[in-house]
Image (cartoon, helix red, strand yellow):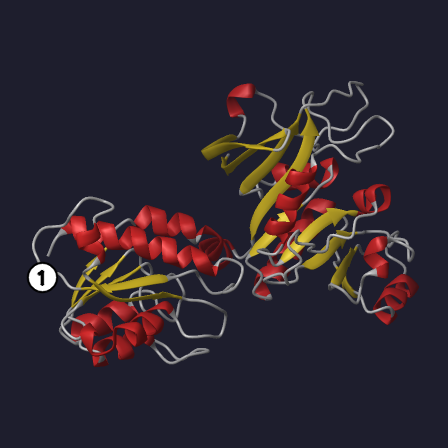
Amino acid sequence: MSAALDQFFMRRALKLAANGQGLVEPNPMVGCVIFREDGGDAGSEDSEENLKRIVGEGWHERYGGPHAEINALAAAGEAARGATMCATLEPCSHFGKTPPCVDAVIKAGIKRVVIATLDPFPKVNGEGLKKLNEAGIETTVGVLESRARELNAPYWTRLEKKRPWTIAKWAMTLDGKIATRVGSSYWISCEESRARVHEWRERVDAILIGSRTAMEDDPRLTVRLPDGREPRRTPTRIVLDSGGALSVFSELALTIRDAPLMLVFGPDSPKEKKEFWESKGAEVLSLDAPEREHRVILLLEELANRGMTNLLVEGGGEVLGSFFDLELIDEVRVFVCPKLVGGKDAVAPVGGVGRELMRKAATLRGKKIEAIGTDVLITGRVDY
């Protein structure tokens, strides 16, 4: 066995796994490569010799469909016997939407299984590994584990923190404003940046805004892809609307048939408002908590219980401030646009209480900076 080969094929399996983003949730993204170990030492990272060792590969392509291991075994056929399997996640050991993958791996005659990380799902979590070992299959666990966990960080967050992975998105001027002092915000970002947002939307379960943003910007929050293709998924539009103030003539209301709409009401919202919106086809979630922060926590718990894994928060400043103060923002995607509006009363992207000391400011890891049209996109994961 070769550690270099294990890492080479695990990198390939991780790339394959990423193809499932937006298609497999709430399941994790998983990739799998089956290869032969015989044939000499591992080549370089892009070695053609290494690629010739592959007899089958696959990834989890859609929720409810065959898992990555099953797709890879189908591609390999009889060549899987005596080969090594490299999987980004522990093979499942229970009946869910599909039969246990570990049984198929054993039956196929795989000699060794290389696993990036164990599956935290309670019905698996080491049981798949145990069954492989009991069948006499050699296993190696922990190859590129940190990369595998980063890839499926939303999956881990839903299982361990009981809430969706939360992505905060905003576009701001060079002087850090998301709207002028009178609330004007069309358009801060360029056309290319706005097209990128639609690509993000098709990969999340829900998009959230506050009632003020809904009233001032009147967004649709639907997925409109530039090439006209059908989106991978249609996210639920969520409005934090404690008083039931959303207009029946708003774009959100007029597009209820195009995408699900959820209104999150507070304890003092009029009953007739709830009945009215439900008659229009919207879902009304009434949360019996007086403070916005508490309602946010209850909402995220409810979304996780529904299997929602990724939540895109598109502002405005009050909502983003609440999420930030509660340390609920996992990732940021920020467009910085070459415009200046000035004004001490212009709107900043993140309100709330904030941090008192600069040394306690949240920081970004895995930061990336990209030029998009006239804008600069900064992305990263938040460390509090």
Residue density around tag 1, few if under 14, some if 14–19, many if 20 or more, within 10 Å: few
Residue shown at 84% from the left, 32% from the top? 183
Number of dots carrying numbers: 1
Between residues 109 and 125, which one lies in front from this camera angle? 109
Residue 311: x percent and y percent?
61, 52
Q: Nearer the viewer, residue 209 or 130?
A: 209
Image point 18% across, 72% down: which residue?
Answer: 110
The image shows residue 160, relative to residue 291, as above or below, that is below
Of residue 32 and residue 144, the one placed in the foreground of this image is 32
What type is the residue that disc 1 sits on? Asp
Question: Quick check: can you spot residue 360?
Answer: yes
* Residue 306 at x, y percent in the picture: 60, 66
Drawn side of residue 316 relative to residue 31, left or right: right
Image point (83%, 47%), residue name:
218
Left or right: 136 with respect to 98? left
- Residue that numbered label 1 is attached to: 38
Q: Which residue: 22% across, 81% down?
A: 107
Instruction: Give the percent coordinates (x, y) of residue 142.
Output: 25, 53
Q: Quadrant of residue 249?
A: bottom right
Residue 197, image x and y in percent? Answer: 64, 45
Query: Which secondary structure lies at badge 1?
Result: loop
- Image quarter of the N terminus: bottom left
Camera sees residue 350: no
